[in-house]
Image (cartoon, helix red, strand yellow):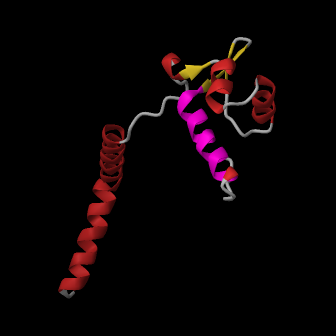
Amino acid sequence: MNAETDLGVLVMQFAANYGQSLKLLIADTIRETLLNTAPPIDPFPAKEDLITRKEAAELLHISCTTLQLWTKEGKLPFYRIGRKVFYRRSEVLISLKKIEQIKLGKKVKYV
């Protein structure tokens, strides 16, 4: 046997004996790193971020009827709490920028 073959045999023996433990160690390390470095995603916006329909319409300088239409068309994401509808101020401001771009003749993609 040559050195290359010996190394191959050692690697195979190591994988057979410690392969599963090594996989678990790597997975745990990656999971811990992601949890410690990635910002948490909150699916429910904080109450202070939310504004009413009337506030959103005023911020966009549109009527409540137009706001309702834009919401129905998917131009504005909304949050329903009970029977009431709210908007995130930051998302309304993003929509306002898109509206201004449309007025300037630029093509805008709604998400």
Q: Position of residue 50 (x, y in %)?
A: 56, 21
Q: Residue at x 35, y 38 (%)?
A: 35
Which of the 4 quarters of the picture holds residue 37?
top left
| Residue located farthest toward the left when viewing the structure as drawn | 3
Front residue (pair 24, 18): 24
Q: Which residues are magenta?
A: 88-102
Front residue (pair 45, 32): 45
Magenta-span inclusion, residue 92: yes
Q: Position of residue 79 (x, y in %)?
A: 65, 24
Left or right of 38 in this view: 65: right
Q: From what the image shows, is residue 54 above or below residue 59?
A: above
Left or right of 8 in this view: 49: right
Q: Position of residue 7 (x, y in %)?
A: 22, 77
Magenta region, main secondary structure: helix
| Residue located farthest toward the bottom when viewing the structure as drawn | 2
Which of the 4 quarters of the picture holds residue 69?
top right
Q: From what the image shows, is residue 88 above or below residue 38?
A: above
Q: Which quadrant, please, contains the N terminus?
A: bottom left
Q: From what the image shows, is residue 92 above or below residue 31?
A: above
Q: From what the image shows, is residue 16 above or below residue 93?
A: below
Q: Residue at x 75, y 29 (%)?
A: 67
Q: How many marks?
A: 0
Magenta-span inclusion, residue 49: no
